[in-house]
Amino acid sequence: GEGGYLGEQYGALGECPSLRRVVFEEGTTEIPAYICAAGREGRLTGLQEVQIPPSVKKIGRYAFENCAGLKELNIPENVEVIERMAFRKCTGMSKVYSGSTVGSLILENNVFQSCEKLKEVILSGNTKKIGDEAFMGCVSLEELLLPESVEELGYRIIAGTAVNSIKIPKSVKESGEGGYLGEQYGALGECPS
């Protein structure tokens, strides 16, 4: 479920500061939306570890938003989609790893937005899409290696990061456009470095 006040998102395990570890049972195919969403204040700061079994194919929207204590994410090989804002504002996360995946991997919009300590991202060679503002505001991110499998890049994927050079693979066929109040941004829009 989801709930909250004034636009805050809370899940079933939101506002549980003593919770350190969440283990999803083997055979789970979907991590529910909002399950650990911690609201605007990031009140699930105690959560340090999430064990996601290889059977998972989908990580729902806002599932771990504002879980500031998470340090690393290992994306299991069967995950096909990580929905929007699933790990947004996980400010303690420093590493995201996606080894070889069985099928294609899609990262929806704002998936890792504002993960301020994120330094290392290793994406699967089967990653097909990186959604709008996926890494926006990851101020510690200095490098993003796009796999040769990526076909679509959303807009402002690395805005507000420390990335100063990026190689766009020849597989990219589509680049998102978007903006606010008539402004237009491409995949690399608003990249000051």
Image: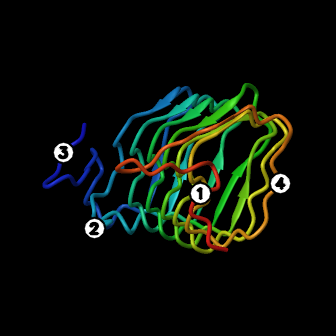
Of badges 1 and 2, the one in the foreground is 1
Q: Which quarter shows the N terminus?
A: top left
Q: Residue at x 39, y 34 (%)?
A: 32
Give the residue at mark 4.
167
C-alpha distance separating marks 3 and 4: 41 Å
Q: Contact (CB < 8 A) between labels 3 and 4?
A: no
Give the residue at mark 2.
41
Q: Compare residues 185 and 16 and report the one nearer the observer.
A: 185
Question: Crowdedness of circle 4 by 10 Å Cα count: few (<14), some, many (20+)?
Answer: few
Of badges 4 and 2, the one in the foreground is 4
Sequence-first tag of 4 and 1:
4
Amino acid type for the residue under numbered disc 2: Glu
Amino acid type for the residue under numbered disc 3: Gly
What number of labels is visible? Answer: 4
Give the residue at mark 1.
189
Amino acid type for the residue under numbered disc 4: Lys
Residue 113 percent coordinates (x, y): 50, 58
Res 140 quadrant in image:
bottom right
Sequence-first tag of 2 and 3:
3
Q: Residue furthest left?
A: 5
Give the residue at mark 3.
3
C-alpha distance separating marks 1 and 2: 28 Å
Sequence-first tag of 1 and 2:
2
